[in-house]
Image (cartoon, rainbow, N blue to C red):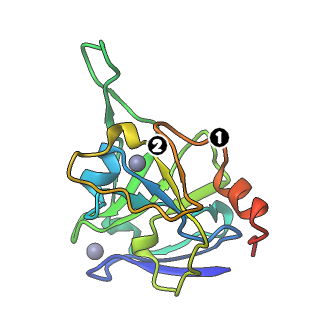
């Protein structure tokens, strides 16, 4: 599926191809919540990094999240790159150097109508804010940490690869 995306002020527009465009994954970690998630979570899609085209790249800044494990004195920077428009603050996509072939656009940045997922995966619930209610359907999966099932695996299991 071809996806078109943009930030709110339209200084950045982008497009990419995605075999895994269902917005089924809700991440409740504090990074997603604070940088992205008004409802308490953010939604990542799976896209093909080699197809990414960007206009207005000069308006993009990259945030390396500060990570602090329990018992650690100092924080370290996550290797993951969170790309966002530095004019309007819209989060655009996440890129991890460990998986250079993948781009994870945030569903909120995508303008192409996305397919409605038949079920959801709720993850990193151990970082959920107390005020956030998990709105889980009967088939939904819930995880304190990360699920073993990747975004690609989920689409394969449900026969939804595009
Ligand atoms: Zn913008
Ligand atoms: Zn997260």
Give how far across and how far down residue 148 sits, in percent: 65, 40
Quadrant, the N terminus: bottom right
Quadrant, the C terminus: bottom right
- Residue 80's label in the rendered image is 2
Q: Residue at x 20, y 52 (%)?
A: 131
Give how far across and how far down residue 155 sits, in percent: 71, 64
- For the residues labelled 1 and 2, the Cα–Cα distance comes to 19 Å
Q: Are circles 1 and 2 on residues that touch, CB within 8 Å?
A: no
| Quarter assignment of residue 158 | bottom right
- Residue 161's label in the rendered image is none
Q: Nearer the viewer, residue 86 or 72?
A: 72
How many residues crowd around disc 1 within 10 Å: few (fewer than 14), some, or many (20 or more)?
A: few
Give how far across and how far down residue 55 sits, in percent: 45, 77
On screen, residue 17 versus residue 72, left or right, reads right
1 to 131, vertically: above or below: below
On screen, residue 66 versus residue 49, left or right, reads left
**Residue pointed to by mark 1:** 148
The quarter of the rendering in which ligand 1 is drawn is bottom left
| Quarter assignment of residue 153 | bottom right
Q: Earlier in the sequence, mark 1 or mark 2?
A: 2
Q: Residue at x 67, y 63 (%)?
A: 50
Tell me the mark number nearer the camera, choosing from 1 and 2.
1
Q: Residue at x 30, y 60 (%)?
A: 36
On screen, residue 38 versus residue 21, left or right, reads left
How many residues crowd around disc 2 within 10 Å: few (fewer than 14), some, or many (20 or more)?
A: some
Q: Residue at x 64, y 48 (%)?
A: 100
């Amino acid at each position: 599926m071809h996806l078109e995306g943009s930030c709110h002020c339209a200084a950045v527009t982008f497009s990419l191809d995605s075999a895994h465009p269902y917005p089924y994954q809700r991440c409740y970690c504090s990074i997603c919540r604070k940088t992205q998630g008004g409802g308490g979570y953010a939604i990542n899609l799976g896209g093909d990094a080699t197809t990414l085209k960007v206009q207005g790249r000069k308006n993009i800044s990259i945030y390396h999240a500060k990570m602090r494990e329990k018992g650690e004195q100092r924080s370290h920077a996550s290797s993951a790159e969170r790309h966002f428009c530095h004019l309007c603050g819209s989060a655009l996509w996440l890129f991890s150097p460990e998986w250079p072939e993948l781009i994870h656009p945030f569903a909120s940045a995508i303008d192409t109508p996305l397919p409605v997922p038949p079920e959801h995966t709720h993850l990193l619930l151990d970082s959920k804010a107390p005020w956030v209610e998990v709105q889980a359907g009967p088939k939904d999966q819930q995880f304190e940490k990360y699920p073993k099932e990747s975004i690609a695996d989920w689409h394969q299991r449900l026969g939804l690869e595009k």
